[in-house]
Image: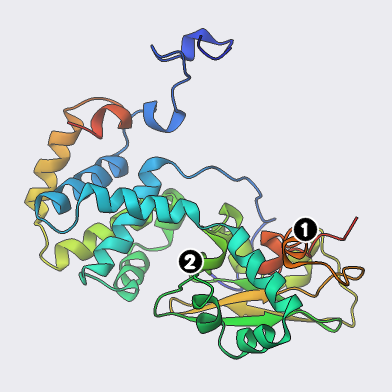
Amino acid sequence: MPHDHHDHDHLSPSGHPYREDNDAPLSYWQTMEIAIRELMVEKGEFTNAEVNAQIDAMDARAPANGAQVVARAWAEPDFHAALMKDAAQATREMGFDIGPMNLVAVENTRDVHNIVVCTLCSCYPRNLLGLPPDWYKTRAYRSRTVKEPRSVLAEFGVTLPETTTVRVHDSTADMRYIVLPARPEGTQGWDQAQLAALVTRDSMIGTGLPKEPE
Amino acid sequence: MGGEAAGPVPHDQHDFALWEKRVDALMILGSARGHFTVDGLRRALEDMGAQAFEDMTYYERWVAAVNENLIEAGVYSLEELGAKMEEVKARGDTYGEAQNV
């Protein structure tokens, strides 16, 4: 029995709604994507299986990776030290390889709040957070974060005391940043899985704070 | 663009379409094959001019930059691309129809 969709004009013969992405009129740039991919496969540059594997790997990366790193840094002083010294190496050892790029962990404290941007385009610690959210790539975020970080933070619901120093980190193609948020109060004795559940994507970009324990 | 005035940060989020994920994969695999670096992509993006950043979406700019770099590297020619795009278009009017022979 097909799913109970109400608007039957938009169902495929299988009873599922068409994916909007694939039934809109073919655009010039989509045509180019298909053409490039097929030319590359025909010329033996790579296979369709490699393209699919790359997409699967991309889909598997998620902020949960970063949350695991943050929770471990909160719980294990040795790992915290290793992460602050060389975050690329420390996260690689956890299986989150950033490749040849540098990764710098910047730590939030009571006095300092860090926020990450890429004014050029969209550089982002994909090994820990997956693909960047759309707002990270917008003109507004990229333009304003370096100029008026406090008002950008306020839009994200983060209002900091005037005494807190705000540090803005501008990513580049080979230098990425991850924010190590401050460990929430009231989490003494928590295990790493419990801690990781408090770590949000935005808290690792600096546009948010970790969840408070309930 | 960093430091220029701009409006509120938009919070709309869309799931990445299949074709966008494929552009991302083309970028990574083409780079892994040694045909371009991230700097080469960057240069192509900047050569597009400011208007492209108003008129084109993020992955539209990326596919254009990947294409430019692959042609410059001699992986395929402009003629080959043109012929292939015509072939793709002839398959159907939607991405779903055109993506497979």
Coordinates of residue B71 in the picture (x, y in percent): 15, 61
What's the colour scheme?
rainbow
Location of residue A166 (image quadrant): bottom right
Write down the chain letter for disc 2: A
**Crowd around label 1: few <14 · some 14–19 · many ≥20 (10 Å):** some
User: Which type of secondary structure does the marked residue at label 2 adopt?
Assistant: loop
Q: Residues within 10 Å of mark 2 (few under 14, many from 20)?
A: many
How far across and down, in percent of the image, does residue B6 sit? 64, 61
Residue A121 circle label: 2
Q: Is residue A124 above or below residue A16?
A: below
Res. B92 image quadrant: top left
Left or right: where B70 falls relative to A117: left
Q: How many marks?
A: 2
Residue pictured at 81% horizontal, 82% vertical: A109
Say if A21 sits above or below A58 in the image: above
| Percent position of residue A164, x then y | 85, 81
Q: Name the residue: 11% across, 54% down.
A: B78
Observer-nearest of B74 and B99: B99
Q: Which residue is mark 1?
A: A155
